Amino acid sequence: MNTAANVLFADMNKNKTTQPPIVTVIRYDICNYEMDSTCSGIPSDAVNKLLDIIQYTGWECTDCRINSQQKIDKLQAALTLVNEKLSDLMATVDNIQQITAGHTENDNVVSKTDIK
């Protein structure tokens, strides 16, 4: 995640004689929306600390966090189902191996009734 590249600095009110405020715009990593530090009401010292942290952790909005969690929940449910089916398949293969191990080398035919 290269969040540092997503942080933009803009110098506002360039034509004023006083020191212009620095507006920091932080772009969310998933949806690419932006948060303006002056509109958010977050003090500049807190924004500076956030910039230090988000270069390692990333930055995402609440909607993206909720959507991501819902996708993770669906993936976990699907993985559980796959594990259950794999377990059933392994039990069937185990059963077939036990049945075929009971036959002699000369008996090459396994009937359908043997596999149930």
Image (spheres, grey):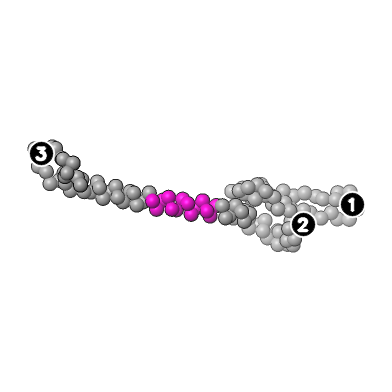
- Please tell me whether mark 2 or mark 3 is closer to you in this view: 3
Q: Amino acid at mark 2?
A: Thr
Instruction: Tell how many labels.
Output: 3
Residue 95 x, y percent position in the rendering: 21, 48
Disc on the earlier residue, 1 or 3: 1
- Residue 69 visible (yes or no): yes
Q: From the image, tell me which residue sits under label 3.
A: 107
Find the distance from the CA under tag 2 to the CA under tag 1: 18 Å
Circle 3 — which element?
A: loop
- Please tell me whether mark 1 or mark 3 is closer to you in this view: 3
Residue 3 x, y percent position in the rendering: 63, 50
Mark number displayed over residue 30: none
Residue 71 x, y percent position in the rendering: 51, 51
Find the distance from the CA under tag 2 to the CA under tag 3: 83 Å
Q: From the image, tell me which residue sits under label 2.
A: 38
Residues at marks 1 and 3 touching, judged by CB atoms closer than 8 Å? no
